[in-house]
Image (spheres, coloured by chain):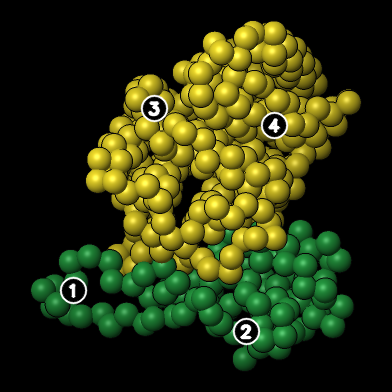
Chain colours: A yellow, B green
């Protein structure tokens, strides 16, 4: 199996001609993934942006087999396909799901949990644009504190729940591999994709995917926001690999929050107090993350068999 | 300015004959990935102009294009496929040598 990296990415495209918005981060993740995995791929997308922009009659944006699953059923359809091809003796096909944060963290969470529990060889990629973008920017369980959406118009820093930690939710199932990545770190993303496709069992990737119309950011900001969200500490790059937790990038000091938040209209209403609350929540999240990493390092690896 | 907009492989425009009889329409999507039945070029308000003489062909603009609209030309340098580019400007922002400038659409 050839190693996946930026240098070995082939010229072939398996996701082009879609009608995604200009500068869409989610389509960038899809394009990279399918380029890297090649044509031996079965793709499942639930109802959402990616199905709305790819299957536009009389044209198809996917160059591989792809199907639309019901909103809540990405995980179920993935594990069904994986079980089928296993029964038919097909070994060289990747079964990949691309779901947004709504279809992963909220509506499809029980289906994802079931799929992770069934231990089929599937690759689940959540492109996280932090709200229900396809239906017009409604708040989801993965919307960060302080972000304006049409259903959380004030941002609600002090009242809203924290963003669901999808990597830890997936890791809690004891699956072989779960990791977070961004559009701003393609080498890191492709390395994690390479690892995810090789493990024996379900793998989960949680990828930061800017949405220019939903976030009110510039259309050329998808990669830049991916870098600044990591530098500000709001999106830790972590990796769960067979019970071991690695924090891939630990900034010695976090960049000012304004570097990231200031580039997006959805955070425009935030005041000093809100920013302090977001910074405090971030610091707490990092403490919990480091504690989790230490705890997993101290535990016997046999507690999480491959 | 790197010349007129082009449409190069792996992308191709495949105009779709709009039948008037419903029965004449195929039941499933007929154009695969890599074919466009209607150009995406109309989405664009700015055009990425590449200063090719200083380009070293690092390929970051190809990597970061969400639409796969940046392709290699015969000289191993990037070229924009006009029907595919939506003018987002990611290539210009990510070019390490700042050789891509978003500017007004070249008039044919």
Q: Where is residue B93, by image quadrant?
A: bottom right
Q: Is A242 in front, or is A28?
A: A242
Q: Are marks 3 and 1 on the same chain?
A: no
| Image location (x, y in percent) of residue B38 | 41, 75
Mark 1 Cα shell of 10 Å, populated few (<14), some (14-19), many (≥20): some
C-alpha distance separating marks 1 and 4: 48 Å
Q: Which mark is residue B90?
A: none
Tell me which corner region of the image, top left, top right, bottom left or bottom right, holds residue A148.
top right
Residue B25 badge: 1
Mark 3 or mark 2: which is in front?
Answer: 3
Say if A7 sits above or below B108 in the image: above
Q: Chain of mark 1?
A: B
What percent of the width, then of the height, locates residue A155? Answer: 61, 25
Residue at position x 60%, y 31% from top? A179
What number is the disc on residue A119?
3
Residue under disc 4 on the same chain as residue under disc 2:
no
Residue drawn at (74%, 48%) of the image: A224
Compare marks 1 and 2 and give the one earlier in the sequence.
2
Estimate how packed mark 4 is, as few (under 14), some (14 to 19) or many (20 or more) residues with alpha carbons within 10 Å: many
Element on which disc 1 rests: loop
- Reading the image, the residue beneath label 2 is B5
Give the chain letter at badge 2. Answer: B
Look at mark 4 in the image and give the residue it sits on. A237
Among numbered discs 4 and 3, the one appearing first in the sequence: 3
Q: Secondary structure at mark 3?
A: loop
Could you give the CA–CA distance between mark 4 and mark 2, rounded to whole angstroms? 39 Å
Please tell me whether mark 1 or mark 4 is closer to you in this view.
Answer: 4
The reply to whether residue A22 is in sight is no
Question: In this view, which residue lies farthest toward the bottom?
Answer: B108
């Amino acid at each position: 199996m050839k190693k996946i990296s930026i240098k070995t990415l082939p010229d072939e495209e398996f996701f082009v001609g879609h009608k995604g918005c200009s500068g869409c981060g989610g389509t960038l993740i899809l394009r990279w993934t399918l380029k890297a995995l090649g044509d031996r791929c079965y793709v499942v997308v639930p109802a959402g942006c990616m199905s709305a922009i790819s299957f536009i009659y009389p044209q198809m944006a996917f160059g591989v087999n792809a199907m639309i699953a019901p909103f809540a059923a990405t995980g179920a359809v993935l594990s069904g396909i994986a079980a089928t091809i296993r029964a038919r003796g097909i070994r060289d096909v990747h079964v990949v799901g691309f779901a947004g944060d709504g279809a992963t963290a909220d509506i499809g969470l029980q289906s994802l949990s079931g799929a992770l529990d069934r231990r089929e060889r599937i690759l689940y990629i959540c492109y996280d644009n932090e709200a229900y973008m396809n239906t017009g920017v409604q708040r989801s369980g993965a919307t960060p504190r302080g972000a304006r959406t049409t259903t959380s118009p004030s941002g609600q820093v002090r009242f809203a729940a924290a963003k669901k930690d999808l990597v830890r939710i997936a890791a809690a199932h004891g699956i072989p591999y779960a990791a977070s990545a961004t559009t701003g770190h393609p080498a890191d993303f492709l390395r994690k994709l390479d690892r995810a496709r090789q493990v024996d069992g379900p793998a989960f990737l949680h990828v930061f995917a800017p949405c220019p119309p939903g976030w009110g950011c510039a259309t050329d900001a998808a990669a830049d926001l991916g870098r600044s969200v990591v530098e500000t500490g709001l999106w830790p790059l972590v990796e769960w690999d067979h019970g071991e937790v690695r924090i891939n990038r630990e900034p010695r000091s976090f960049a000012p929050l304004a570097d990231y938040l200031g580039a997006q209209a959805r955070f425009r209403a935030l005041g000093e107090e809100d920013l302090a609350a977001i910074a405090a929540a971030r610091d707490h999240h990092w403490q919990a993350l480091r504690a989790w990493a230490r705890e997993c390092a101290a535990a016997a690896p046999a507690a999480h068999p491959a | 300015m790197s010349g007129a907009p082009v449409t190069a492989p792996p992308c191709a425009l495949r105009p779709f004959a709009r039948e008037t009889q419903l029965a004449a329409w195929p039941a499933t999507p007929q154009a695969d990935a890599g074919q466009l039945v209607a150009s995406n070029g109309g989405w664009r308000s700015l055009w990425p102009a590449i200063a090719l003489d200083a380009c070293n062909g690092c390929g970051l603009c190809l990597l970061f294009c969400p639409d796969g609209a940046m392709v290699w030309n015969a000289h191993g340098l990037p070229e924009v496929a006009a029907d595919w580019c939506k003018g987002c400007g990611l290539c210009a922002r990510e070019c390490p040598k700042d050789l891509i400038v978003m500017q007004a659409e070249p008039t044919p």
